[in-house]
Each structure stands twice: as structure tokens, then as C-alpha cells.
Image (cartoon, grey):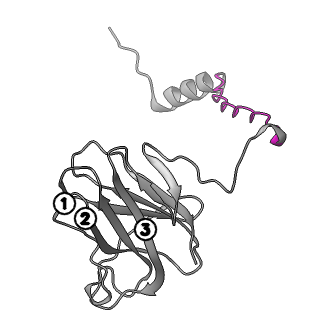
Amino acid sequence: MRKPVLHASALLAATTLGLSGCVFASTPEPSPPAPPEIDPDDLELDLDDPPEVGDGETVDITGSFEYDDGLVVELSDFRRGTSSTSAIPSTEPYIALRLHVENNTGADIDTTLTGISCTIGEFGQDTDTVVDFQQDIENEISGTLQDGDRISGGYACVMMDHEDYLEIEVDVNDVGTREPVFFSGYVD
């Protein structure tokens, strides 16, 4: 008994004819949702008052903040400069400031974990802090701050000359229960 043999050309012709009758439909792309209709008159924007950001309080860049327990945090002495060649990061434009912490809590506090972080520009771009001992920018205050005493330290953040909006988050982590304070506003 003889077995049927299917030649390659016949197989190709059958496949071509079979597939030519098939129609492959592409899956349609989903259309994007229509943007919501917003009437600008319905928006309540106060461009002079800084927005609340995350947990914590937001105050003016030159203001001060007092926690419920009597701890006071404030910023002062803003100045622009360029970090030295031995700084980290080196030769970068920065905004420097003094951070002051005053203890009126009735107890001693540990300021070792106190720190800042900075965002610049209207859209809140994170930026690096600067350490430059040649320019009195240690980026730390540390030690035990006794009740009634005040401590200050030099801090700085990389900030290009064309930027003028700054937000500084200050964390005083002495007991781990304090929310950060956000200082925000325009600087020269």
C-alpha cells in the first residue's frame, strides 16, 4: 500500500490559500479619557500662601515655628555662594542659611539627628545639601540641648542662580514623634 506524499510546493500553496482567506484584525487602541472640564473661576488658589506639603506644618521661609511642647525652629541669614573645591559637592552654587533650635520644652533634647532637606523651584525639585567646612557650612547641629538653651548651625543646599523658590524641610528627631516643619518662599 502506497502512502500519500505531500510535496513542499503543495503544502506551501495550501498554506498560502488557507491564510489568504483569513483576515487578521488588529486590536484597536483604547482612546484616552476626555479631560475634565474645569472652570478657572471655580478654583480657589492663593498664590501668596505656600501650600501644605505632606505631614507637618508649612511656614514662611523667614518665619519661625513653635511645637506644642515649646521647641522653636527658625531659619535666618540666607546667602548665596559657590562651594569650595574641598566641599561636597564642590564648586556648586548654593543657598546657605542658619538653622536655630531653641529648647523651651522643660527637658533636655538630643539634636544629633536634626537635619534638613531642600527642594527648589515651583515644581519642587529635590536638591543636594552642601558640606563646606571652609565656609562654616557643617550641615549639622549635634549634642544635648538643655532646656532654655539655643543652638545654631550652618546649612546649605545646591541652588542655581536662576532659581528663587526654596522649600526646606527641617526634622528635629529627638523623640521620633515630631512632624517635620516646611519653610517655603522666595529667596534673593
- Identify residue for label 1: 146
Label 3 crowding class (10 Å Cα cut-off): few <14, some 14-19, many 20+? many
The stretch of residues the image draws in magenta is 22-40
Q: State left or right for residue 96 relative to residue 166.
A: left
- Tell whether label 2 touches label 1 (CB within 8 Å): yes
The CA distance from mark 3 to mark 2 is 16 Å
First in sequence: mark 3 vs mark 1: 3
Residue 149 circle label: 2
- Amino acid beneath label 1: Gln
Q: Nearer the viewer, residue 111 or 187?
A: 111
Q: Residue at x 38, y 88 (%)?
A: 91
Residue 173 x, y percent position in the rendering: 25, 52
- Tell whether label 2 touches label 3 (CB within 8 Å): no
Residue 74 x, y percent position in the rendering: 41, 63
- Identify residue for label 3: 75
- Check disc 2 and report its element: helix, strand or loop: loop
Q: Residue 70, relative to residue 142: is it above or below?
A: above
Label 2 crowding class (10 Å Cα cut-off): few <14, some 14-19, many 20+? few
